[in-house]
Image (cartoon, rainbow, N blue to C red):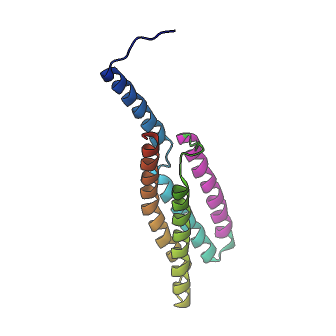
Amino acid sequence: MSTEPIDQASAQAALEVVRTQQKAVISASMVPDGFWATIAALTVLYAATVESSVPALLVIGVIVFVLGNAVAVLWVVFRTGIRQRKGSLGAVHVASIVVLVLSVNAIGAAIAIVLDRADVPYGTTIAVGIAGVVMAVTGPILSRRLRDAAFRRVNR
């Protein structure tokens, strides 16, 4: 079976089409920026209901927190079609996700301890709110970095 030779310009154009399609797939499968703020807001709401010491609010807060998280995660999975393939993120990238989550939790816990010791009313809610802001700001930055890393991997 023989094939017609392809000129260099046609080959480069075809390669550019493939790269554009790869970038579109990668971009579409990234976690939307609003996800991070949604999770942060649900967490602050939950902390506030716990600190309220009002049983009815606590029940409502737990239900909203659990259902809200489930809806947010399912929305991201089904909206973006996230299906990470083996090797799409390197160990360094996976570690960066873990470091972000642990860092945000450590920040919130440290602030909560300080505010609790200072007898600040609703100190845990304030601490979780601060950690939530950190997550809402840094989560999208991490998502963009992971997207860019995935772009570099497919363009090797």
Residue toward you, 4 or 108: 4
Residue toward you, 74 or 99: 99
Q: Is residue 79 visible?
A: yes
Q: Give the tally of numbered discs.
A: 0
Residue 22, compared with residue 58, is above or below; it is above
The residue drawn where x is 53% and y is 60% is 97
Tell me if 2 is positioned left or right of 12 in this view.
right
Q: Can you name the residue that lies furthest to the bottom here?
A: 118
The residue drawn where x is 57% and y is 72% is 48
Q: Can residue 122 be seen in this view?
A: no
**Quadrant including the C terminus:** top left
* Location of residue 8 in the rendering, given as x and y in whole percent from the top left corner: 32, 22
Q: In which quarter of the image is residue 7?
A: top left
The residue drawn where x is 55% and y is 90% is 117
Q: Can you name the residue that lies furthest to the top here?
A: 1
The residue drawn where x is 51% and y is 64% is 100
* Location of residue 120 in the rendering, given as x and y in whole percent from the top left corner: 51, 86
Q: Can you name the residue that lies furthest to the left here?
A: 9
The stretch in magenta equals 57-80
Residue 78 shown in magenta: yes
Residue 76 shown in magenta: yes
Q: Main secondary structure of the magenta part?
A: helix
